[in-house]
Image (tube, rainbow, N blue to C red):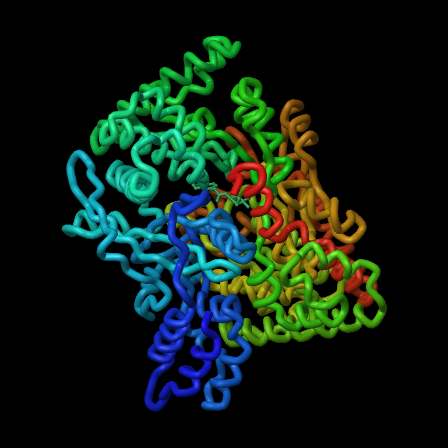
Amino acid sequence: MEKTLFLHDLEELDIQNKDVITLYNEISALAMKHAGNMDEFGGYKCAYYLSMEFLIGRSFYNNLMELGVLEETKKILALKGIDINVFEEIEDAALGNGGLGRLAACFLDSAAGLGLPLHGFGIRYKYGLFKQAVENGCQVELPDDWQRFGDPWSVRRDSEKRVIEYADMRVYAVPYDMPVFGEKTNRLRLYQAEGDAGAEKISEYLYPADDTDEGKILRLRQEYFFSAAAVADLVECYVKRHGKNFEKFPEYNVIQLNDTHPVIAVAEFIRLLTTEYRKKFTDALNIAKRTFAYTNHTILPEALECWKEEYVRKILPDIAEIMIKISVFASREYQSLGCTKEQALEMAIFKGGKFYMANLAVYVAKNVNGVAGLHTEILKNRLFATAHKTYPQKFMNKTNGVTHRRWLELCNKELAELIDKTIGNGWRKDISLLSNLNGFTENTVNGFIEVKKIKKRQLLKYIAEKEGMEIPENFLVFAQVKRLHEYKRQLMTAFAILELYYGIKSGKLSNLHPCVFIFGAKSAPSYKRAKTIIRFINAIADKINSDALTNGRLKVVFVRNYNVSYAEKIVAGADVSLQVSTAGLEASGTGNMKFMMNGAVTCGTMDGANIEIVERAGLENNYIFGATVEELANIKKAGYNPAVCVSDPAHKQAVETLTDGTFSDGGSGEFKELYECLLHGENPDGYFVLHDLGSYVQTLISICNDYVNNKKFAEKQLINVANSAYFSSDRTIKEYAEHIWKI
Ligand code: 26V
């Protein structure tokens, strides 16, 4: 970047009578002007990340930091009488739901930081993830019109727009390029759908409600829309530079499929090569097999996409034909490599009138990866066991990571400076140096205690302003912030809190150190059970916070509209990170890594990346509880009966608050229904909430007790920071680059 020119222009900037939004746009535009050009696609081998979601968060501070002008900008603005924090009113671009979308954003950041050519392709949704309000304890969704602040970090490329054809409509895909700053300036290309009103609907909403046929078809249109645009861009770019011999295409392009959402790109690639460029089907398929790689992010069956043939035929008949043809090739190949007919059917791409997108991805992809060690083992041994037996060399693990630039340097400047003071600032470029923190002195521990105090104070002040709730500084802070899903077991935390509450009230836990539980969670709009859990948590919070007998020792806050910016504050200020999913179901988790980097200890199950966190930071410096994957398998085999758990009086009291009138669900009956689902029905307590509740409560109590020894607790926290380098996405990206992308 032309730093001096930018700073000069900033000094000259006239701020008279300009509101925050205008200033935000003008300063951002200056940075764009002096930042230099984005890298071109295709001059040499690049990796391309196709993702339905990029959960970027607020760009302003992060971009100025990456450009190396954040501190100077702060000073120049201060001289003009502007506090740089005023730009916090500019909201995030929330073009994603949770972990999967945020991972995509962290990956782009790390690749640019490392100077590796990785570019993103996605959709420029008009409305991002809904804004969450809470009314009478219930989630209410409001549209997120993020573009009302302007979009100064994007460049619209009218000259590069192209037509995307469906059987029943034609739509323009107009690219908007966002720079990703670092050692290199990479490119995130988001397409906006234009044309008539029907066309524009395609890029209107992230996850349109898919409980109707129309909603499902819209989702399929979205997936094809950006996948087809991206493939066309890459093919066109290749032909311009290298001609129509596609044999060398994989030497210049590797396409990473972020979950099954963009898998339709494979079929589109083959369609393009066989129709526009007259290649033979087998040749096109073979080139695809050298070009695409696939990452799986969940084993939950309800999230593994499959498309009804009828839908695909209706809007993309050629694509349906191609996928059926790939399915025939796949079936033959599996059998020729030793699979039985049944095994080939298990991995079939097309069966029973449906297309199985994960099976398509696994067959074509040159590499298939899971996102943490345990998750990859489950893929190899359960979900894709047959494919793994047939193509063992395809499968590999790539444990997730998070960018330490946003999740440490930006969100916890105080901790970053303490680290600089202790081990020098080399870790900012080479994160592996962070391990030099190990063997820290007492001085550093004291420094860390100070930093934690400051970050906690900032967090509690923010919560007081936003949620209108005062929390004293001596409280131990537990945080569970993530999408709301039954497998993540926010409900188990809710029951545990009730047990603590009744314990304090009855005098059994009269010496418990004061603590607060912070929840942040959005539920998918149509996910009723998750919404009930939000309602239950808010009812618990109301009751506990207004109980004068206990509220000096226990508080609960459900923060509204949890998002990336809120996360930046919570991960820095919390003491304990709650990661309590049912073992085997959280593919990795990435919040767990953000907390660790900021020195929160993990209270969690042996699931996802938690396992690798405690492997590195030590079991003794974290709090692991609950059944393991193997134990759960045995419990299931033996027949799980949650009613047995409720024979414990403390559990019984907590669970029965759902039905005994302690809380009101406004007459909806949803609390009773939740109760029934836990104790009766076909598959009672399918996520083993009641099974792990007892050990959870005991673990929370021992954390409170340990916290009383402030210094020792801070040491545990600091050991977590010192061993968090592995969870920087810089490490993850280097592994993708070396083992999969070969860039
Ligand atoms: C989506 C849905 C949508 C329909 C309702 C049920 C359901 C359940 C799970 C999902 C998750 C889709 C994929 C996803 O976001 N996976 C997350 O990816 C993160 C990045 O790899 C990882 O850290 C999380 O553990 C994983 O849940």
Q: Is residue 317 above or below residue 29?
A: above
Q: Does residue 465 appear in this view?
A: yes
Q: Quick one: 362 or 468, which is closer to the camera?
A: 362
Horizontal side of 195 relative to 295 (left or right) equals left
Q: Quadrant of residue 704?
A: bottom right
Residue 389: x, y in percent?
57, 19
- Residue at position x 83%, y 72% from top? 443
- Residue at position x 46%, y 86% from top? 82
Q: Quick one: 457 or 258, which is closer to the camera?
A: 258
- Residue at position x 20%, y 39% from top? 165
Q: Is residue 82 above or below residue 662?
A: below
Q: Quick one: 286 or 652, which is closer to the camera?
A: 286
- Residue at position x 38%, y 39% from top? 262
Q: Quick one: 239 or 533, which is closer to the camera?
A: 239
Q: Does residue 527 appear in this view?
A: no
Q: Is residue 283 above or below residue 10?
A: above
Horizontal side of 1 relative to 590 (left or right) equals left
